[in-house]
Amino acid sequence: MRRAVLAVVLLLVASGIVLAATYTVTTTAAQEVRLTRGRLAWNAANPGDTDATNELFFRRLCVAGYQTVVNNQDQDDAITACATFRAASAAAKNNACAAVGLAAGCNLCP
């Protein structure tokens, strides 16, 4: 029984369900007008993927915005990692190559 419970807990943690957060955002009347206008335009352009409320549309915007932030951070991290790789000694470069399963002398940052 313990193993089954542990497996479920691990599955929930891995999927992010246990670590999920909820945010509350207060909007002004003008912001609600903008959200409604944006939602109606979205719904008209995407009949198979509509949002029934401004809250759902706002969530869609947040997810898209969050993904942009994540993508930018990933790109910044890659630039930093490549600069570090290029500045490393041959031995350090070979170790980095081996760490990702590539042969010594690989070029992780072409």
Image (tube, rainbow, N blue to C red):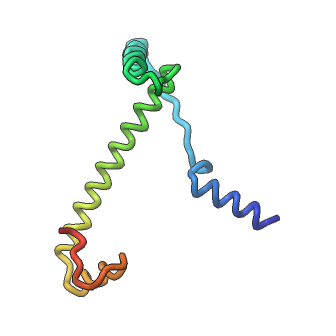
- Percent x, y of residue 31: 39, 17
- In the rendered structure, the answer to whether residue 93 lies left or right of residue 41 reads left
Most extreme residue toward the front is: 48
**Foreground residue among 83 and 100:** 100
Q: In this rendering, is residue 19 above or below 38?
A: below
Q: Residue furthest right?
A: 1
Q: Quadrant of residue 89?
A: bottom left
Residue 28 in percent (x, y) is at 42, 16
Specify the quadrant of the image occupied by residue 104: bottom left
Q: Is any part of residue 104 visible from this angle? A: yes
In the displayed structure, 10 sits above or below 51; it is: below
Question: Does residue 81 appear left or right of residue 56 in this picture?
Answer: left
Numbered disc total: 0
Q: Residue at x 50, y 26 (%)?
A: 56
Residue 21 vertical placement versus 81 (above, below) = above
If the image is split into quadrants, where does the C terminus sit?
bottom left
The one nearer the camera, 66 or 108, is 108
User: Which residue occupies the foreground of this view, 101 or 8?
Assistant: 101
- The N terminus - image quarter: bottom right
Q: Residue 50: x and y, percent? A: 47, 23
Residue found at x 22% / y 71%? 84
Q: Is residue 31 visible?
A: no
Write the residue at 76% across / 67% down. 3
**Left or right: 87, with 39 as reference point:** left
**Could you say where residue 57 lies in the image, as x and y percent from the top left?**
45, 25
Residue at the image point whose x is 61% and y is 56% from the top:
13
